[in-house]
Structure formats: structure tokens, C-alpha cells
Image (spheres, rainbow, N blue to C red):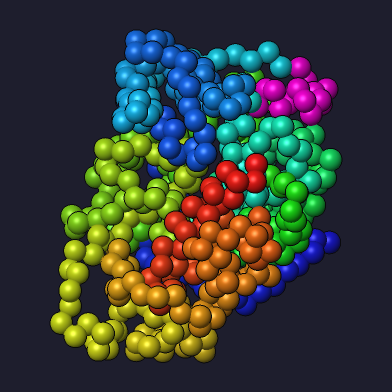
Amino acid sequence: MANLIKTKRGLDIQINGKAKEVIEKTIISEQIAIIPDYYHGITPKVVVKEGDIVKAGSPVFHDKKFETMNFVSPVSGKILSVNRGERRKVLSIVIENDKKNTYEKFDLKSPEKLTGDEIKTLLLSSGLWTFIKQRPYDVIANPTQAPKSIFISCFDSAPLAPNNDFVIGSQMTDFQTGINMLGKLTTGKVNLGTKAGDNLFSTVKNVEITQFDGPHPIGNVGIQINNTQPVNKGEVVWTINVQDVLFIGRFFSKGIVDLTRTLALTGPEVNAPQYCNTLPGCRISQLVEGKLSKKITRIICGNVLSGTKVEKDGYLDPYATQISVIREGEHIHELVGWAMPRFNKFSVSGTYFTGIFENKIVQKIFGKRNYKYDTRLLGGKRAIIMSGEYDKVLPMDILPEFLIKAMIAGNIDKMEALGAYEIAPEDVALCEFVCTSKLPLQQIVRTALDNMKQELD
């Protein structure tokens, strides 16, 4: 029987616009873009030029530090442009989709006969290695370092997150193949974190399953690592999104790079929230065309807490499994806004009248109430306040306020001692949401981890 870990620390944000469990159709735009900035911490070296013909799975650039680590095209077609910015920084590589789905063929042995080194070489050359990340630093995994274990969170507890049971349910064969291949890359175990009471992943073999019960961010893989196998100095663990395991399974089953993923279009400003199949790098405008309200909105690749803002003429983040759309919040100033009773706005502290609806007894009678959020900060930045509010929403065995202060100060010794090795920006997204100081905690963590990597690697 799987272990069960429960926590009451965290916060489930109730927001309108959850996707109906229906896959509308497959949406693949006429132009696909590969944007190096989405792959944090790499320095691209482009291996194609304008006018070149590529197949799905053909390399378009590799990392200068690890030249065997390819980044590949998700579609077949022609290279339209290689766009560069200041100091010749590669901004994007745009590919015209020929809609023929011509794949680069990889000559594979039977998956059962492949060794760990052979699997690693194939993942690097096929571009699938880029979906494996590591802790510490939350970057693409270093292929020269062996992990003590691999962690996969099988559920997402973020606001309006896609239901992975719905997404993965019909693809369990590919998922098992992906797990088998990942298991050969570590001398430790492949760890699955599942939602308490969820039986879909209980039949997966060659894994260690731990069930988790509690509010968000319990679905974050960093929280699960901290509660089961904390990362110590000198240790490395790998993580991979549950949907990305399917990419690996398809590759070793079919010998092609098929990056088709199921994306949830969510949020209160989406007319009919639902799922669609698409590819990384798809143009956002085609994914949301005719589906948004006429209000001024913000489109976010990812969830509303840790996602990134993207324009309609932008392209889909290769790691994103959902798009969230909320109001921009154009009415910045409100007359005596601090004193308004707020019958329709959520409050963590229960300051507003809506706190009545957060009472568990009231929720049992009337159900949970959802709210329409916008992007306003609703307050000004101020000095950090040591109030213990971060601890209430971060179920990790660390001291988050002291860690954040050490990160702001750039004190690497204290960061190491306070748990920086297993944390990632997404883990402090809720802390940022409840922060009375309005600090950009995710940005602080990202900058600190980059500095640590530069100093210690």
C-alpha cells in the first residue's frame, strides 16, 4: 500500500473557468516558434539557417555547454527566420508548418535491451532531454551527473490545473514505457506522487508511489521531494512533468519525436473552457481565437500563480500544460478601496465579508464559491514583514522567510543551510500571493538560484 502524506498548510484558490473534460480538436498553427528563453540556463548555438527544410525531431540548435543536447523542431516545414536581438542573442526560430507531419526517424533497438547510457544518448539527440529538470537550481538536468532518484508529480493542485487522469488515462501504455526508460537512468527509484484516493497510477510498475493529501501547493514536485527525500548538498534529483513522460514513451515505442500535448484553456475570461491537442511553440492567437470575452484580458502560459504573461502574437511555452486568461485589471485606483466591504473578492485573512463563504460549515451547505480575479497588485511594495504568513501556505520543512532574506542578501552559505537546494520559483508562488509586502518572491528565488549555480557549479 502506498504511503500517505497529509498536510493542512497551503491554500486552494477558487477561481472561475475550469476546463470541461472535452478535447475540442487539434490546433496547430501555420507557424511554430522555438524560443530559447523558455529553456532557462542554456546558451543556444543555432544549426539551421533561413530556408532550410526540417522534419519533426530535426535539431534547430544545441546548448553550447553540452553540444549533444539538441533542441528540435516539433513540426516538419521550412525555417522562416532566425530572429536575433542585442549582441546577437537568439530570440526565436520560426518554422513554417508544412502540415505533412514528416518525422525524423530514429533507429531504435527494443526498449528492453537499451542500456542507461544508450537511453541518455537517444534522449539528448532527440531533444527530449530538455524536458528533464533537476534540483538543485530547477534547470535542465546536467547529463554528466547521476541523480539519486527521479520524481514525477502525477497531479497538479494549481488553480484551474488540467486533470491528469483525464489527459493520461487513455495513454497509460506510453506512460509505462516512459517510466521504464527513466528507471534505467538512475540507480535510485522513480517516485510517483499521486493524489490521495486516485487509482489511475496505482498499476504503474517499476515505481515507488506516495499519496499526498492537502491544499495547493501539494501537487508541486518540490513539495513532494521535501516531504519524502530532501536534497542535501552534493545530491541531485531529476524531475519531469507527467505529460512529458508520454513524449519519452512514444519515442521509444514508435521511434519518432511526437510532442503532441493536451492543453487546458482555462480562466474566467474564456467563453467555453476546455481542452485541445497542440504542440509546443504554437501561436497563441490560434489557440484562443474566438474563445475570449471582449474585456481587456491577460493571457498566461501556465497557471495564474506561476505562469508567464504572453501576448496573442506570442508562442506557447514548451513546458505549459494550460493557458489561463483573466482580466487585466485596468481600474487601478478605487475610491476608499481599502474600506470597501468586498462581497465578491477573496481574502486570505478573512478581512472581507466573503470570509463567511470560506467557513467549512458554510461550504458544506452552499458549496465552494469561485471568484473572478484580475491582475492588480492591490497594494504597494514595502519592507519584508516577518509575520509567519509564508509558513502557512508552504508545506516544506524549511524557514521560508529567513531563506528569502538570505536570497535577497545573496548569502549563499545561509541559502544552502536554509533549504535552497530543493526549492524552485513555483514553490513560493503562493507565498507571493499572500505576501503583505508585495515582494516578487519567484523572481527573487530565480535570481538567487542562478547565482548559486554560477558560484558553486
Q: What stretch is highlighted in magenta?
A: 109-123
Residue under the image location 54 percent in, 49 percent down = 451
Q: Which percent across, then down, holds residue 450?
A: 53, 47
Q: Which percent across, then down, holds residue 271?
A: 29, 55
Depth check: give the residue in front, 23 or 108: 108
User: Which quarter shows the N terminus?
Assistant: bottom right
Q: Tell me: residue 367, above or below residue 316.
A: below
Q: Which percent across, then down, holds residue 321?
A: 48, 46
Magenta segment: does it hold 118? Answer: yes
Q: Which residue lies furthest to the top in this view?
A: 52
Magenta segment: does it hold 268? Answer: no
User: Which quarter shows the C terminus?
Assistant: top right
Specify the quadrant of the image occupied by residue 94: top left
430 left or right of 83 in image: right
306 left or right of 271 in image: right
Residue under the image location 31 percent in, 38 percent down = 314
Residue under the image location 75 percent in, 49 percent down = 234
Residue under the image location 79 percent in, 46 percent down = 148
Specify the quadrant of the image occupied by residue 438: bottom left
